Image (cartoon, rainbow, N blue to C red):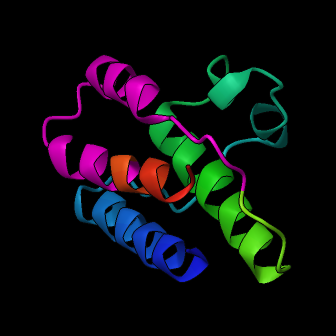
């Protein structure tokens, strides 16, 4: 399972870059320290994916810890991508759906 998740995370990162949604500069430490789900009060969803979700899952796998189960971020992603006006969100949503499925 973790190898499939690693591959999907790399694909998600590549897709964010392909769509010019990958940022070179991190958000402020205060924005990253949000305690709200998905840092909804401080970050756009794509930043949350880049700076929180992808690194956190990679760190969990690097430490040999079990991945969280019950991941279901696709419904939120659908709404967040609409709010961010991301035109080509289908490929991103497909990758997120596959990640959700892998972590069930």
Which residue corresponds to the image point at 19% horizontal and 52% vertical from the top-left? Answer: 91
Residue 40: percent from the left, percent from the top? 62, 21
Residue 19: percent from the left, percent from the top? 23, 56
Residue 60, compared with residue 43, is above or below; it is below
Which residue corresponds to the image point at 53% horizontal and 83% vertical from the top-left? Answer: 3
Residue range in magenta is 68-96
- In the rendered structure, the answer to whether residue 70 lies left or right of residue 20 reads right
Which residue corresponds to the image point at 17% horizontal and 43% vertical from the top-left? Answer: 90
* Residue 57 image-quadrant placement: bottom right
Residue 61: percent from the left, percent from the top? 73, 75
Magenta segment includes 88: yes
Residue 57, compared with residue 63, is above or below; it is above
In the displayed orientation, state which residue is furthest to the front.
104
Q: Can residue 26 be seen in this view?
A: no
- In the rendered structure, the answer to whether residue 100 lies left or right of residue 66 reads left
* Residue 1 image-quadrant placement: bottom right
Magenta segment includes 15: no
């Amino acid at each position: 399972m973790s190898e499939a998740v690693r591959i999907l995370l790399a694909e998600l990162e590549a897709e964010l870059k392909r769509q010019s949604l990958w940022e070179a500069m991190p958000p402020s430490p205060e924005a990253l320290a949000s305690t709200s789900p998905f840092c909804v009060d401080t970050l756009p969803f794509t930043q949350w994916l880049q700076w929180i979700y992808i690194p956190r899952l990679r760190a969990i796998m690097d430490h040999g810890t079990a991945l969280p189960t019950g991941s279901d971020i696709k419904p939120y992603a659908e709404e967040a991508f609409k709010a961010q006006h991301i035109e080509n969100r289908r490929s991103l949503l497909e990758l997120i759906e596959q990640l959700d499925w892998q972590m069930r």
